[in-house]
Amino acid sequence: MSKIPVLETFGPTIQGEGMVVGRKTMFVRTAGCDYQCVWCDSAYTWNGSEKHRTRMLSPEEVMDELVALGGNRFNHVTITGGNPALIGDPMRRFINLCHQQGHKVGLETQGSRMQDWFFDIDDLTLSPKPPSSKMETNWDTLDRIVHELTGHSVNFSLKIVVFDNEDVEYAKSVFARYPDVAQKYVQPGNAHTDASGNISAYLLERLEWLFGVVISDAAFNSVRVLPQLHAMVWSNERER
Amino acid sequence: MSKIPVLETFGPTIQGEGMVVGRKTMFVRTAGCDYQCVWCDSAYTWNGSEKHRTRMLSPEEVMDELVALGGNRFNHVTITGGNPALIGDPMRRFINLCHQQGHKVGLETQGSRMQDWFFDIDDLTLSPKPPSSKMETNWDTLDRIVHELTGHSVNFSLKIVVFDNEDVEYAKSVFARYPDVAQKYVQPGNAHTDASGNISAYLLERLEWLFGVVISDAAFNSVRVLPQLHAMVWSNERER
């Protein structure tokens, strides 16, 4: 395969979450996922509902789209999905192309699949999915990825989306399992990804709850708690 | 002077803004400032209204208070003011004490005064004040501080609070003046620091405005835009 299955490109916008929160960036969202999280906020990447929108694009075509959208108003590209780690060599070439054009590259994946182009990512987020997702973590795979990233000094973070107390315990177990990972995040989950109105009050309530969880527990002393800023500002609007 | 003028200590709480946004931390707020920003959200540190609350404490006494409040539930201490850079040797000793106890130290100052203990800070924010503050930036002093911090490889950021378009231009000029500073932030100002009710809708509007400013201008390609999360969650509540 020499092309990338692209569901959407958009931006410039603001990265609303995680290790590069607040950074202006372009988004490339790939189609296809090995997970089906029950609360996925991008289920259209894997449930077939937008299969007709998926296009097979070369790395150069993806870059052309980003430049057409953003002109000179960006120097950072975020790749997300779906799970972009399902894609091999075309993704490596796209990342190289970004670097050639002077752009930093962020990528988010659940950590279920390794790619050696992970070593080329500037801001890599591994986001293992907690029990509320109804997915199972493959710990052998995740261990291997964390080990490889650490060995290659990749700038990466672990980020756990948290909906309930069981997820809190899962987050603690992940962070305890990888004590050498410096950048650790928890993020309140959005249970209203289908709501059409303003959800900021709900999201702030969930953030206040998670603030309280983190504050009260020494296990979270080195963990950052951040919301999804884009969802607070723009609710569930697509491509924002 | 062997003591620190402390207006309040509180925590553990979540750092709501800037380079360590989302991090659990204890706060030490010093009294006294060389500025009087018209929109200061902590004017009680310098306008005399809480002079009776200010206590002269030794570094050890400050640490005792933090431990009494936070127990083992923190490993980061944020020093703010007022302008904590007005304080000399007692502050150096307090920072050393934090490090001896295993805590990282963040500090925020406007960059009007240098202290050589700046080199010991783990997360240092320089926050020069824009025109809306009615303060004048001393560029010679700021140049010297940025130069010294860069030379000593201090982990520091520039953060500009922005209220209006004139402030936007000021932020651009600061960032253009210091191209080698990697960590740059803009933050929407809070014009309702005296409001008693929920100000989250207002703050989200201002964040959306500033998102738009950053998105549309190539001068902000490498700048992060972040709100004050604590004000969105807890409005203007003190010691939160």
Image: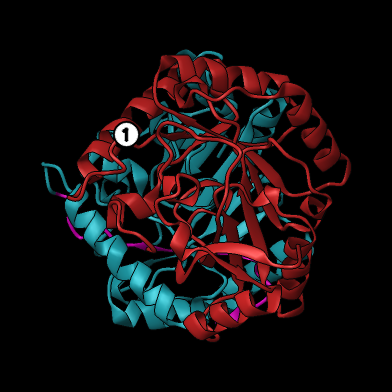
Chain colours: A cyan, B red
Q: Quadrant of the N terminus of chain B?
A: bottom right
Q: Which residue is mark 1?
A: B191
The x and y percentages for residue A158 are 54, 64
- Decide: is A141 above or below A114: below
Say what amino acid the circle numbered 1 marks: Ala
In which image quadrant can residue B139 be found? top right
Closest to the observer, B208 or B67? B67
Is residue B124 inside the magenta stretch?
no
Report in which chain the residue with disc 1 lies. Answer: B
Residue sitting at x 61%, y 74% = B62
The x and y percentages for residue B141 are 77, 29
Closest to the observer, A5 or A204? A204
Left or right placement of residue B192 versus residue B61 in this view: left
Residue sitting at x 40%, y 83% = A169
Q: Dot 1 lies on which element?
A: loop
- Decide: is B22 above or below B198: below
Q: How many marks?
A: 1
Q: Which residues are magenta?
A: A176-194
Q: Is residue B103 visible?
A: yes
The x and y percentages for residue A13 are 41, 30
Q: Quadrant of the C terminus of chain B?
A: bottom left
The x and y percentages for residue B111 are 68, 37
- Decide: is B108 above or below B67: above
